[in-house]
Image (spheres, helix red, strand yellow):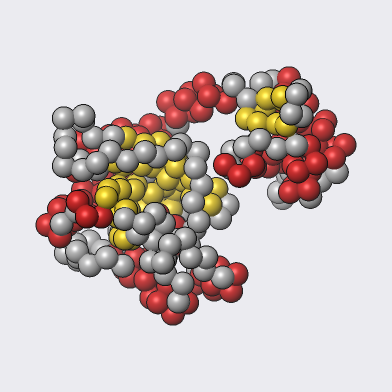
């Protein structure tokens, strides 16, 4: 039996909503409308969260935003969660090895969210250092990290997203349903994904999934750089580094089976 406390669920939904850039500063009316809850109920929940410093209320603008206590709480969660701490250390190693900005991505419902990022050493000038905003959500259907989550879902889930429409983020975003499904099958077969300019113009991402013991994708490692700075030789090296790290972290989680082990990394961008 599944037990749910409605007020706790609503509080969690409110925090997730305020974590999105579009809703980072929202009125009570906007929050209630977006969450499909009554303003009175939302007000009680928000005032409770405010007292505990989980949200901040601006009395001049009458808008809510995330509260200050979430900053040390998030840092502490990263330290105490062994899987996150180990993955965070690993992306630092990959950034130093490849010279590319590297991030750790987690899926919140249908939104991949950056939860940690690492930059290469300042003396490493192979690539421009790119900025990644922790907490930023990205579309599930555009780019390499979304594919690493979706590829291991049931194909009926792919069709749900296709039916909802594949939103073009740039002219390079894959919006053809047949090609989109074929690429997801390639990712599932190879164990990694590469995208070129599909989420941000001129940026290439190399991603690989980290599995939990049950076989679900828990996190994705994503290395990004300016596309014009990446040649085919270095792309293959990055694929090896990212896929190897994801495999190691998956095995630490208790996952044994890996796709793509028998394949040589391909430089083709999918």
Decide if residue 111 is in sight here: yes
Determine the residue positioned at 62% across, 30% down: 66
Question: For this view, does 102 lie left or right of residue 153?
Answer: left
* In-front residue for pair 229/195: 229
Q: Quadrant of residue 270?
A: bottom left
Extreme-bottom residue of the structure = 178
Q: Quadrant of residue 69?
A: top right
* In-front residue for pair 244/223: 223
Counting from the top left corner in percent of width and height, residue 73 is at 54, 24
Extreme-left residue of the structure = 233
Question: For this view, does 46 lie left or right of residue 259?
Answer: right
Determine the residue positioned at 36% across, 38% down: 131
Counting from the top left corner in percent of width and height, residue 9 is at 72, 41
Question: For this view, does 20 lie left or right of residue 83?
Answer: right
- Give the number of marks: 0
* In-front residue for pair 258/18: 18
Determine the residue positioned at 31% across, 60% down: 196
Q: Is residue 68 above or below residue 102?
A: above
Q: Is residue 262 above or below residue 7?
A: below
Counting from the top left corner in percent of width and height, residue 4 is at 74, 43
Determine the residue positioned at 76% across, 29% down: 62
Decide if residue 54 is in sight here: no
Q: Is residue 104 above or below residue 67?
A: below
* In-front residue for pair 85/139: 139
Counting from the top left corner in percent of width and height, residue 250 is at 34, 47
């Amino acid at each position: 039996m599944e037990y749910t406390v409605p007020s706790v669920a609503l509080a969690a939904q409110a925090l997730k909503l305020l974590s999105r850039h579009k809703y980072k500063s929202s009125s009570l009316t906007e929050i209630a409308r977006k969450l499909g809850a009554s303003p009175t109920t939302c007000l009680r929940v928000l005032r409770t969260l405010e007292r505990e410093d989980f949200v901040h209320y601006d009395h001049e603008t009458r808008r809510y935003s995330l509260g200050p206590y979430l900053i040390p709480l998030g840092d502490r969660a990263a330290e105490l969660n062994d899987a996150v701490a180990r993955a965070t250390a690993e992306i630092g190693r990959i950034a130093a090895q490849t010279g590319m900005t590297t991030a750790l991505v987690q899926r919140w419902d249908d939104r991949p969210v950056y939860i940690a990022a690492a930059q290469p050493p300042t003396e490493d000038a192979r690539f421009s250092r790119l900025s990644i905003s922790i907490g930023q959500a990205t579309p599930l259907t555009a780019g390499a990290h979304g594919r690493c989550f979706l590829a291991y879902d049931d194909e009926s889930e792919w069709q749900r997203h296709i039916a909802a429409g594949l939103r073009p983020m740039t002219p390079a975003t894959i919006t053809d349903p047949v090609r989109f499904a074929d690429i997801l099958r390639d990712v599932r077969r190879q164990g990694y994904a590469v995208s070129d300019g599909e989420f941000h113009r001129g940026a290439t991402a190399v991603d690989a999934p980290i599995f939990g013991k049950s076989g679900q994708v828990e996190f994705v490692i994503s290395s990004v750089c300016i596309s014009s700075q990446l040649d085919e030789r270095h792309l293959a090296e990055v694929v090896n580094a990212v896929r190897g790290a994801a495999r190691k972290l998956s095995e630490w989680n208790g996952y044994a089976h890996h796709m793509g082990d028998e394949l040589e990394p391909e430089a083709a961008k999918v």
